[in-house]
Image (cartoon, coloured by chain):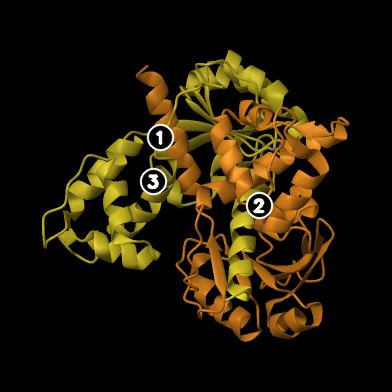
Chain colours: A yellow, B orange
Amino acid sequence: MAKHKITAIPSIRRLPSYLHIIRQSREEGQEYISGTVIAQELHLEPIQVRKDLAITGIVGKPKKGYPVVALMAAIEHFLGWDEIQQAVLIGAGNLGTALAGYQEFHYHGLHICAAFDRDTSKIGTSIHGVPVFSLETLPIQIRNLKATIAILTVPSSNAQEITDILVGAGISAIWNFTNVKLKVPETVVVQKEDLTSGYAMLCVMMNASRHE
Amino acid sequence: MAKHKITAIPSIRRLPSYLHIIRQSREEGQEYISGTVIAQELHLEPIQVRKDLAITGIVGKPKKGYPVVALMAAIEHFLGWDEIQQAVLIGAGNLGTALAGYQEFHYHGLHICAAFDRDTSKIGTSIHGVPVFSLETLPIQIRNLKATIAILTVPSSNAQEITDILVGAGISAIWNFTNVKLKVPETVVVQKEDLTSGYAMLCVMMNASRHE
């Protein structure tokens, strides 16, 4: 896996929730939004919000806050969400189908253009409008579709084998929903989603709440 | 939402991945594991791993590292994963079905004992062995099953209405997979999962990788 040292990981992880609030405020016709308002919405400290937003390069105006349109543009540009990314979905099971139908991705430039599965009963169908192809056609389709991202929702036992195919076909980034630590060359980035992280947070909060 | 100030959130989020590695090392028959080995596996700094593990109260031995069995027990106890939690799944769609079949949860004491849906074609069936009931029976079933956790995977438009029912039925914790910011009393904890956070990380890593 590429060893790019990414700093400010918690800040980056919070930016999408800021974007969500800022978009709502734009839809309500507001021109400015303050860090304090964002902080209140998300139960964070205002200083934290201002620090997080500073990584995108934008600075608020005293008493007025941040200009809404410029703030959205700054966050989207920082995250690279102002460009469309073509993604392929590997695995058209329940999780893959849920991801294909996840509306939020459309806002963020993530376009899932094709899904792939081994199950012949799924091949030729579509999930939320995304066509499902045979896994055998994966390398040629990745090139044809100019896909840069692969979203991996296959059984763990196939994860590394399919990763090797993805890497060979020139994919730049793998969003890994399996629990396998994938081996990839330095040039390929991997983001591993671990649902148990969120469950850990829930449990620690429950525990803290009981002992109050 | 309960305002319990949880510190060390990034550390808590990393603990499950440590547990995964430590469990593997126990299965390989090892008695001790060093912070450095865990750090290498996850591309972290050893000092970070030692700091994270310190929140569970365990201390390593110089040159030997941490005793594997005690370390697992300390993490599981810190997270409350040494107790079984009865959970109900609200929404038996694709995401709900994927969560019902997620094997990792079994290791962590999370027992999904029932699912609920409005769709009459799903009621009476089961998903990965979890029986699906009518949403109308939710309050009585939560009490009968002594469920403490609700996993919410319903459409966003129903999220608050169902949350109010859950709170009325005495649920302690909601694991929220919708994109609605739920209103709950102070006594109920909510962990909101945001898939776009992981996508933000992936995009920032891709960008860093391109500019090397």
For disc 2, the chain is B
* Label 1 crowd bin: few (<14), some (14–19), many (20+), radius 10 Å: few
* Label 2 crowd bin: few (<14), some (14–19), many (20+), radius 10 Å: some
Residue A95 versus residue B205 in the image, above or below: below
Question: Horizontal placement of A113 versus B32: left or right?
Answer: left
Q: What amino acid type should be assigned to the residue bearing mark 3?
A: Ser
Residue A173 versus residue B73 in the image, above or below: above
From the image, tell me which residue sits under label 2. B56
For disc 1, the chain is A
Looking at the rendered image, the disc whose residue lies closer to the viewer, 2 or 3, is: 2
Which quarter of the picture shows residue A63? Answer: bottom left
In the foreground, A97 or A30: A30
For disc 3, the chain is A
Locate residue B168, reporting x and y percent. 61, 86
In the foreground, B155 or A8: A8
Q: Are marks 2 and 3 on the same chain?
A: no
From the image, tell me which residue sits under label 3. A11
Given the current orientation, which residue lies at the most extreme right position?
B29
Any part of residue B58 in sight? yes
In the foreground, A99 or A161: A161
